[in-house]
Image (cartoon, rainbow, N blue to C red):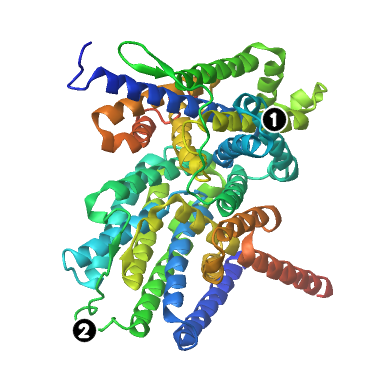
């Protein structure tokens, strides 16, 4: 095999795969943020905590109820999504008539509460979650662990299904219409508040799903969401929240860029996305896929 | 004419409150542990600087810890490794915070509202990683045992009691400059931008320049607060550059009252005292802070001082109406 700038191909491919996996999480999370923001104009700061909850609920289901990974994959988004519905009904819905910044502050407070409770209960050292599909395949130029391949493939599929639902179905058409003119859509007899509640639930469910996918790769710990969500915010600023496909492409793309940076300049890998964000803001403030307002 | 008179009255009341506050703080260290008071003063200045941006400019920065914490590192390093005097060390930290504020401000003011918050948060995280990796910050250990050299080579500040009055003076100067800024024509334009940006643009104001100046000022005083805190505790650590610290200053300002003159001070005192009382309760501090956030946003968005001012205004309005009907 070829060698690129003195980097063995195994290392390069390994980091590319890791980058793709991170990209999958960025895409899933920024997709949920974009869907919620589109309809509610609220930046959901709790998103990281809900991703962490996803991983924890999967761990609890296995620990206390003996429900394996595959069951968790279905149950966790529903359970965590339901908590999202409760949060939206009880708390967030009271703030729609106010400045959007209050929604951000409220969800930030919620994130602190959730993270604090989990830290109090489980410490911050992290809990293991065993890999549901061990083993892998040697592809000649790299070793592909089955589970990592599954994460990339499955999250891509989820992203595309979400995109299809929003852009190509009747339900998605209602959703897009309500994003533009909620008052008019309501006048046509569609229950917009209920739609908002369900959208929030689905967005939260997507975050929880990402959490389940992450559980076997990273250790399950209460701080896993907080650091990730800040990177996802940068991803969202880079992509702009105007287009669903845009957030998917940006998420995966930035994951790959981050993976490559880890190969060529490891020290910069933690900051590369923020640097890209700064550059994008200088050149194209509305984001790569955003529309200027 | 009456509104101008009311504004002048308001300023008089504010100055009286400030004088009383200063008098209380002069005797406070004889009753309360001076280190705790200095901590409150540093955070109060930090929150006042933050309030200049959110309360009067309408810009929510979720990354103010980068100025606070980075200035702390710069002061700590220049004093300890370069042997700079205390006052020059604090000035160095403040100046670097101002420079950082200029760079970050130029990037961040290109977006508004929620995006502005996300951009500042992301840039602050970048500064955090820089502090984590750069050799001069000492990584996880931070910079410890920073000497407290005599101020101007004359005033001995090695004792907490004597340094306390220096910190009080720094706070007073910072507060008065911020106060002056708020009530200057510059501050009025800032408020106009907060209320209606398109109209401010159409009136011919260079909105971006006003925002940038406000951002740099805010960063500078946040830096001054951080630099002072590092000399108080003789320590600079990663805690001060984390996103949690950025969240704390938001919380202080929100609880006390965004856009009020004394709100940030009250908020800072409450949060610092709460953390001090709850030190044995581990992660419950985080939960408590989260609960305060949620309750404040849902129930009293004006904050403590904001609610008091609003109540006083309602009462004086009622009195005014009565006087008008009688007369």
Decide: is A129 above or below B4.
above
The quadrant in which the N terminus of chain B is found is bottom right
Which label belongs to residue B57? none
Which residue has dot 1 on it?
Answer: A78
Decide: is B198 above or below B93.
above
Q: Chain of mark 1?
A: A
Residue depicted at x 75% and y 44%: A90
Position of residue B17 measured from the top left corner of the image (x, y, whole percent): 55, 78
Disc 2 packing (10 Å; few <14; some 14–19; many ≥20): few
Instruction: Work out how far the residue at label 1 is from the one at label 2, CA to CA, in angstroms.
Output: 67 Å
**Considering depth in this image, is B32 or A184 the residue closer to the camera?**
B32
Q: In the shown orientation, is residue A110 left or right of residue B142?
A: right
**Considering depth in this image, is B102 or B234 the residue closer to the camera?**
B234
In what element is the residue under mark 1? helix
The reply to whether label 1 and label 2 mark residues of one chain is no
Disc 1 packing (10 Å; few <14; some 14–19; many ≥20): many
Q: Chain of mark 2?
A: B
Looking at the rendering, which quadrant does residue B153 occupy? bottom left
**Considering depth in this image, is B32 or A25 the residue closer to the camera?**
A25
Position of residue B47 measured from the top left corner of the image (x, y, whole percent): 47, 62
Would you say residue B207 is visible in this rendering? no
Residue depicted at x 42% and y 31%: A285
The quadrant in which the C terminus of chain B is found is bottom right
Q: In the shown orientation, is residue B322 left or right of residue A246?
A: right
Which label belongs to residue B154? 2
Would you say residue A262 is visible in this rendering? yes
Count of picture labels:
2
In what element is the residue under mark 2? loop
Residue depicted at x 39% and y 60%: B222
Position of residue A225 measured from the top left corner of the image (x, y, whole percent): 51, 40
């Amino acid at each position: 095999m070829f060698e690129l700038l003195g980097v063995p191909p195994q290392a390069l491919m390994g980091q590319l795969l890791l980058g793709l996996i991170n990209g999958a999480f960025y895409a899933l999370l920024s997709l949920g943020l974009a869907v919620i923001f589109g309809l509610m104009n609220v930046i959901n700061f709790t998103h990281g905590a809900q991703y962490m909850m996803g991983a924890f609920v999967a761990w609890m289901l296995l620990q206390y109820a003996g429900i394996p990974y595959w069951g968790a994959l279905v149950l966790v988004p529903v359970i965590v999504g339901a908590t999202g519905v409760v949060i939206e009904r009880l708390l967030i819905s009271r703030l729609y008539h106010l400045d959007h910044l209050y929604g951000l502050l409220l969800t930030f407070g919620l994130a602190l509460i959730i993270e604090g409770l989990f830290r109090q209960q489980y410490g911050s050292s992290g809990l293991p979650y065993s890999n549901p599909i061990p083993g892998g395949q040697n592809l000649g130029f790299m070793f592909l662990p089955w589970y990592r391949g599954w994460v990339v493939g499955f999250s891509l599929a989820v992203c595309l299904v979400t995109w299809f639902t929003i852009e190509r179905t009747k339900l998605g058409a209602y959703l897009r219409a309500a994003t533009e003119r909620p008052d008019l859509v309501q006048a046509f007899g569609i229950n917009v508040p209920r739609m908002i509640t369900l959208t929030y639930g689905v967005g939260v469910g997507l975050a929880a799903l990402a959490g389940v996918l992450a559980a076997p790769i990273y250790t399950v710990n209460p701080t896993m969401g907080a650091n990730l969500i800040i990177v996802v915010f940068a991803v969202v600023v880079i992509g702009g929240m105007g287009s669903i496909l845009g957030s998917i492409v940006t998420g995966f793309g930035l994951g790959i860029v981050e993976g490559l940076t880890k190969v060529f300049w490891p020290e910069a890998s933690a900051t590369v996305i923020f640097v890209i964000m700064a550059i994008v803001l200088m050149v194209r403030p509305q984001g790569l896929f955003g529309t200027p307002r | 004419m009456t509104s101008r008179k009311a504004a002048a009255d308001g300023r008089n009341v504010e100055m009286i409150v400030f004088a009383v506050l200063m008098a209380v703080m002069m005797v406070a260290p004889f009753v309360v542990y001076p280190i705790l008071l200095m901590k409150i003063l540093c955070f109060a200045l930090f929150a006042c600087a933050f309030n200049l941006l959110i309360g009067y400019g309408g810009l929510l920065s979720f990354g103010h810890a980068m100025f606070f914490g980075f200035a702390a590192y710069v002061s700590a390093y220049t004093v300890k490794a370069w042997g700079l005097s205390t006052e020059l060390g604090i000035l160095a930290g403040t100046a670097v915070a101002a420079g950082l504020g200029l760079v970050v401000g130029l990037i961040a003011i290109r977006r508004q509202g929620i995006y502005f918050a996300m951009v500042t948060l992301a840039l602050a995280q970048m500064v955090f990683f820089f502090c984590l990796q750069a050799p001069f910050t000492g990584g996880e250990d931070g910079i410890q045992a920073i000497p407290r050299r005599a101020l101007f080579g004359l005033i001995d500040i090695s004792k907490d009691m004597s340094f306390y009055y220096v910190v009080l003076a720094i706070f007073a100067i910072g507060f008065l400059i911020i106060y002056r800024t708020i009530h200057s024509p510059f501050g009025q334009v800032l408020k106009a931008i907060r209320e209606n940006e398109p109209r401010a643009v159409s009136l011919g104001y260079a909105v971006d320049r006003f925002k940038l100046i406000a951002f740099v000022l805010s960063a500078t005083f946040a830096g001054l607060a951080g630099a002072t805190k590092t000399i108080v505790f003789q320590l600079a650590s990663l805690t001060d550059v984390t996103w949690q610290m950025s969240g704390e200053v938001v919380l202080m300002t929100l609880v006390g009252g965004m856009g009020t003159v004394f709100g940030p001070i009250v908020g800072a005192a409450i949060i610092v005292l709460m953390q001090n009382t709850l030190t044995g309760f581990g992660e419950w501090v985080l939960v408590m802070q989260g609960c305060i956030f949620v309750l404040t946003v849902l129930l009293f968005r004006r904050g403590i001082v904001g609610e008091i001012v609003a109540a006083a205004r309602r009462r004086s309005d009622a009195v005014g109406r009565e006087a008008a009907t009688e007369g």
